[in-house]
Amino acid sequence: MAPYMIVDDVSDEYQHVRTQICDGCGFSGSYKVIMQRLVEIDGKPHDVLECKCKECGAERAFTYDVSVVFGRYGDMFGKRAKRSK
Ligand SMILES: [Zn+2]
């Protein structure tokens, strides 16, 4: 149901963006991240990277499931929230 790519680290998002081919001009790796924001989808944290092609100016947003990343931060800070059995 969730078609979003699950990432293990925020850097994976940027790496993924760099491999994308622009819909507008067909250049690969031409998307540049202009804004990153956090949204909640189905109760899970997701990162949205709003990108713009540096070749033709086309804009596109990519969404990633970052619940794994957040889960790890939870562990790092010693929180016990939402431990899976
Ligand atoms: Zn383009």
Image: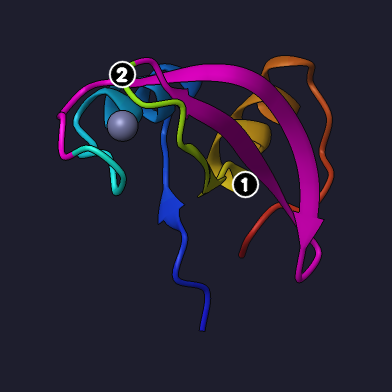
Task: Choose between 83 and 19: the one closer to the eye.
Answer: 19
Disc 2 residue type (three-letter): Glu
Left or right, residue 77 beside residue 29: right
Residue located beneath label 2 in the image: 55
Q: Mark 1 and mark 2 in contact (Cβ < 8 Å)?
A: no
> Which residue does the image show at 54% across and 42% down from the upper left?
68
Q: CA distance from mark 2 to mark 1?
A: 32 Å
Task: Choose between 45 and 76: the one closer to the eye.
Answer: 45
The circle drawn on residue 67 is 1
> Which residue does the image show at 19% across and 30% down from the upper left?
19
Instruction: List x then y, in percent, for residue 10.
Output: 49, 22
User: Is 76 above or below relative to 17?
Assistant: above
Disc 1 residue type (three-letter): Ser
Total marks in image? 2
Membership of 81 in magenta stretch: no
First in residue order: circle 2 vs circle 1:
2
Task: Give the SS element for disc 2.
Answer: loop
Task: Choose between 15 and 25: the one closer to the eye.
Answer: 25
User: Is 14 above or below relative to 26?
Assistant: above
Left or right, residue 30 beside residue 66: left
The image's colouring method is: rainbow
> Which residue does the image show at 77% across and 36% down from the upper left?
38
Q: Which residues are magenta?
A: 26-54
Estimate how packed mark 2 is, as few (under 14), some (14 to 19) or many (20 or more) residues with alpha carbons within 10 Å: some
